[in-house]
Image: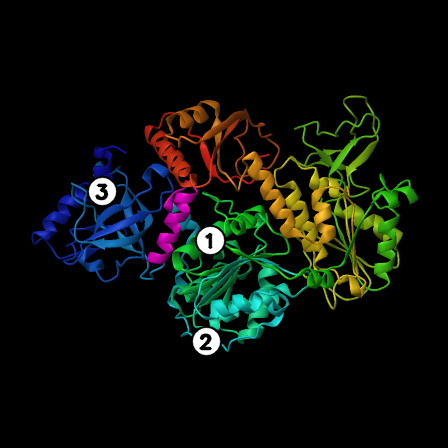
Amino acid sequence: MGEAAEREARGGEQLALLRAAARGGAAPRARPRTWRGARPAEHLPVARVLVDKGLVHLDRYFDYAVPAAMDAEAQPGVRVRVRFGAGQRDGRREGGRLINGYIVERRADSDFPGVLAPLAQVLSTERVLTPTLLRLCRAVADRYAGTLADVVALAVPPRMARAERQPSAGPQAPPAPPGPGGWARYPHGPGFLDAVARGEAPRAVWTALPGPGWAEELATALATALAAGRGALAVLPDGRAAARVDAALTALTGGGAHVLLTADAGREARYRRWLAVSRGAVRGVVGTRAAMFAPVHDLAIAAVWDDGDPAHRDEHAPRPHARDVLVLRAAQEGAAVLLGGHAVTAEAAQLVETGWARPLAADRDTVRAAAPLVRTVGDEDQARDEAARSARLPTVAWHALRAGLAEGPVLVQVPRRGYAPHLACHRCRAQARCGHCHGPLAAEAADEVLGCGWCGTRQPDWHCRDCGGTRLRAVVIGARRTAEELGRAFPAVPVRTSGRDHVLDTVPDAPALVVSTPGAEPVAAGPGYAAALLLDGWALLGRPDLRAGEEALRRWLNAAALVRPQAAGGTVVVLAESAVRPVQSLVRWDPAGHARRELADRAALGFPPVSRMAAVTGPQDAVAALLGGAELPPEAEVLGPVPLPAADPGRPRRTGDPPPGERWERALVRVPPGRGAALARALKTARAARLAQRDGAVARVLIDPADIG
């Protein structure tokens, strides 16, 4: 933005009126949307404002004059309305359109050489953007090459006036300190709790034991901080997991010491709870991804459960990950960190490898006593059962099903939802494609007409374009068809399904088949599932993704952890190649060992998290211009660019997709450890320069992409 445009954005006719008022003009007069002839405040008459414009070339503060009538209300942290950009109205120049913003500071003077435009309106006197939250948002924006306005939009929920008018109850007295509970099973567990109670900041990567006890153990860690009179925060991947920890923490503290922040509460109720935290009335927060920014006072512990779950990464720019945000936050606020889960990610293993965190795990005897028996289809099974290699359910799986159903519910995990989401010609094996948009055809039920997975067009008279065949075979079998087949095999046993359309929270402790997609597994009452089948392991392991093995093991461990211990007859059968590393790690129940070996492999190849990486995507000219104009660190290595597949018009748009009809490229920029901040700064500066020039399309930048192939 040039100097002339900036002067227009800051004023116009209003500036002269404000000067005249300062020399003794008419008394200040308020109007609903603008202030004219307003006298400036006598003390600290300049407000530095963060405007709600998520443009990287406008990622800075703008100064506005504070009218005297707004002096008491226009305090740092409140929401305001300001005029931004120049415009015309009734033939006269105006100060631009009204947009929202936040006051971040009151000052005595401004470095802007012209006359400042006044604030238009104070929307609320609630100080929602505190200095601590502002500092965290700035750190997140810098790490992810994003804008402060975008991060603040993620951190501060939309205003609900009725919720703001309701006062929050006063803070309760700290609850009684809890006992160690399940932490006694971990050699260093009680010591971790003692350090939190003393006000220290221990950092741990917690490998939770299988079984239902993890929610109570996480709640105990939070209650320990609350009992010390300090704040506690836990971020979980979904509402079901958050509800379990919420119930466990309520049982320990009696309720009232914390709030549950999830989307299920509704916008007004969620904002009311957020305000209770911001006002200091509540010190504990349990919630999903957005809770990573919850303004907890005097934070003592920040915990993340199952940090490998993709739900922890926000889909809105700049796409921060809850684990990284809480690590930044803990460093700024001197809080303890607890990264927990049944699985261990390579990122968590790196924190242990560098000495930033310490491992927190049970000894091998305790792990073996808590874990179920895990079986694979090995060479001996294949020798006894010739169909074991090719059958979807070999003999060992049928035996586990029958034995488990005699004792209680049995869990069946299927990687794909639907009925038959991937079909092919029975004769030539060519994939069945839609005649309208060439999307994949799928079957929703045995007697339903085929439908396109992208545009939804029905194909009642499908025939293969390659060979003319009319018969189909299921290449991938979904959860619905699996439930149908198992129901025919066990007609006397109820079959229940849990997936995206309908997720079960719990199932009773009675014989039943529970068919679930990964992440939607319900908790079985009583001692847990009697057995579990992990089907179609090839579908998880065969994905062209750097994290395929890690993600497969994470999903298997989360499902197997719901099964009874081996001593109680719990058995898990995983149908995947028995020699691959994730399967062997599941058999040994050694997620930390798998993470260490995965980290070593990535270090040898220079892959994240050992290196820092950025993805630059966009049209060919835009990618080349951005990389050519960026002052990258000398150690930076540019990989590519390579073309990205064009998005089909009939397929639903996803984050990061090219616009329909456009051909995009992607380049990866890699730097060694310690240079990630320089990489983000260089790309952000180059992108800001391109946007300011307004010369064609500007490539997108994503720091630490999850899918680098």
**Looking at the image, is mark 3 or mark 1 earlier in the sequence?**
3
Q: In this view, does 191 lie to the left or right of 551?
A: left
State the SS at label 1. helix
Question: In front: 420, or 673?
Answer: 673
Q: Which mark is residue 513?
A: none
Residue type at the position of mark 1: Val
- Residues marked 3 and 1 touching at CB (< 8 Å): no
At a point 46% along the width and 51% down the height, the residue shown is 325
Residue type at the position of mark 3: Arg
Distance of label 2 from label 1 (alpha carbons): 26 Å
Spot occupied by residue 176 in the image (x, y as percentages of width and height): 50, 78
Asked if one can make out residue 222 in the rendered structure from this viewpoint, the answer is yes
Displayed quadrant of residue 497: bottom right
Residue type at the position of mark 2: Pro
Q: In which quarter of the image is the C terminus?
A: top right
Main secondary-structure element of the magenta-colored stretch:
helix
State the SS at label 2. loop
Mark 2 sits on what residue? Answer: 174
State the SS at label 3. helix
Q: Residues within 10 Å of mark 1 (few under 14, many from 20)?
A: some
- Residues marked 3 and 2 touching at CB (< 8 Å): no
At a point 58% along the width and 72% down the height, the residue shown is 180
Displayed quadrant of residue 89: top left
Distance of label 3 from label 1 (alpha carbons): 38 Å
**Residue span colored magenta:** 129-148
Question: In front: 578, or 89?
Answer: 578
Mark 3 sits on what residue? Answer: 10
Q: In which quarter of the image is the N terminus?
A: top left
Which of discs 2 and 1 lies nearer the camera? The answer is: 1
Q: Which mark is residue 327?
A: 1
Figure label count: 3
